[in-house]
Image (cartoon, helix red, strand yellow):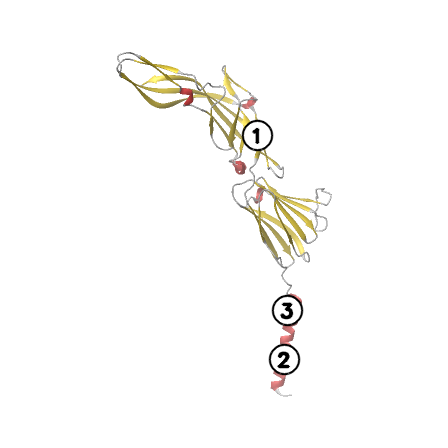
């Protein structure tokens, strides 16, 4: 047999062996038809199929990863301590600002975005681990309804109180007549009550949550609780308001001598109260609730005097 024939046989044999090895050792990559979904944050849903063969594990990820939680349930709605691919019927992936539900029917997955309580799009990913590869499915949840303040309690037994003075704007009054005159001013319209609920750093996600709460008022030398004295607050932000305990139409009389120019400044004394608080916040669609805590600070104008400059 000539060398040319021998070399031809060797070359053909090598091609066949390479083809056989490729077929045996290279697994086909699992195909997912769509791996990007946009869901409305107040109940948007979608359905898709995933390859089950070779699926070893499912993981979830979002930028709030340390705060996020995954819960598994069977077809009877019972929480699973040891979930498997065969007994899971529902997966809830949630954090204080979102909730995403997955309903499992074999290889068919129904996903529903119950909540995105932020004002921005939120990205959440499900990562499917197969024997030789991983596939990521990304969900962009659009803004839904905001978190709700269900309850807020303040530990007034652990409070501190004090006073401080705040000066108003300088006002000029001119009397060009030959007679003295009286002028009424309303200083309590210039000075509002103030409240700030400063939350702890690790509850950063709750900053900006709004809600109406009952607030105490200062009267007869002490702070008093009230079920009717309410105002809307924003967690982590200073809120100014007119306290129902203050008559903003209470006047102060200024006497102006004849042919004079007088400059006056209102000097307001505030009473302050500081105490720790806890608040219970709820996602509006899922109903999931989360606690936050921080420092409650309120100040109320209690007395005013007018200084002539």
Q: Are marks 2 and 3 in contact (CB under 8 Å)?
A: no
Number of marks in the rendered image: 3
* Residue corresponding to mark 2: 10
Question: Could you tell me residue 286's position as x and y percent?
Answer: 63, 39
Mark 1 or mark 3, earlier in chain: 3
Mark 1–mark 3 distance (CA, rounded to whole Å): 62 Å
Q: Quadrant of residue 73?
A: top right
Q: Are marks 2 and 1 in contact (CB under 8 Å)?
A: no
> 304 above or below 10?
above
Mark 2–mark 3 distance (CA, rounded to whole Å): 18 Å
Left of 130 or right of it: where is 167?
left
229 vs 10, nearest the viewer:
229
Mark 2 or mark 1, earlier in chain: 2
- In what quadrant of the picture does the N terminus appear? bottom right
Label drawn at residue 266: none
287 vs 206, nearest the viewer:
287
Mark 2 or mark 3, earlier in chain: 2
| Residue shown at 54% from the left, 31% from the top | 211
Look at discs 2 and 1 and give the one toward the viewer: 1
> 109 above or below 23?
above
| Residue shown at 62% from the left, 75% from the top | 15
Q: Secondary structure at mark 2?
A: helix
Q: Secondary structure at mark 3?
A: helix
Question: Could you tell me residue 304's position as x and y percent?
Answer: 41, 17
* Residue corresponding to mark 1: 278
Label 2 neighbour load within 10 Å: few <14, some 14-19, many 20+: few
Q: Quadrant of residue 114?
A: top right
* Residue corresponding to mark 3: 22
In the picture as drawn, the residue positioned furthest to the right comes out as 76
């Amino acid at each position: 047999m000539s060398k040319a024939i021998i070399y031809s046989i060797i070359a053909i044999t090598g091609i066949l062996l390479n083809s056989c090895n490729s077929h045996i050792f290279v697994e086909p990559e699992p195909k997912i038809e769509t791996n990007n979904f946009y869901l409305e944050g107040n109940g948007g849903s979608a359905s898709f199929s995933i390859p089950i063969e070779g699926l070893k594990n499912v993981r979830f990820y979002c930028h709030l990863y340390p705060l996020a939680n995954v819960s598994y349930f069977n077809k009877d709605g019972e929480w699973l301590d040891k979930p498997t691919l065969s007994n899971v019927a529902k997966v809830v992936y949630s954090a204080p600002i979102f909730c995403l539900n997955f309903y499992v029917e074999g290889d068919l997955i129904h996903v529903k975005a119950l909540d995105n309580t932020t004002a921005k799009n939120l990205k959440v990913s499900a990562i499917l681990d197969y024997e030789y590869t991983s596939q990521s499915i990304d969900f962009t949840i659009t803004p839904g309804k905001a978190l709700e303040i269900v309850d807020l309690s303040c530990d007034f037994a652990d409070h501190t109180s004090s006073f401080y003075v705040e000066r108003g704007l300088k006002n000029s009054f001119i009397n060009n007549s030959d007679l003295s005159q009286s002028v009424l001013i309303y200083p309590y319209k210039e000075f509002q009550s103030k409240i700030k609920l400063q939350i702890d750093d690790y509850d950063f996600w709750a900053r900006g949550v709004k809600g109406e709460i009952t607030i105490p008022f200062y009267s007869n030398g002490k702070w008093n609780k009230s079920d009717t004295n309410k105002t809307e607050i924003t967690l982590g932000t200073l809120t100014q308001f007119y306290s129902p305990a203050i008559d903003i139409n209470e006047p102060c009389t200024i006497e102006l001598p004849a042919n004079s120019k007088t400059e006056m400044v209102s000097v307001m004394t505030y009473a302050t109260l500081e105490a720790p608080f806890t608040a219970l916040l709820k996602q509006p669609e899922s109903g999931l609730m989360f606690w936050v805590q921080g420092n409650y600070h309120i100040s109320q104008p209690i007395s005013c005097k007018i200084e002539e400059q």
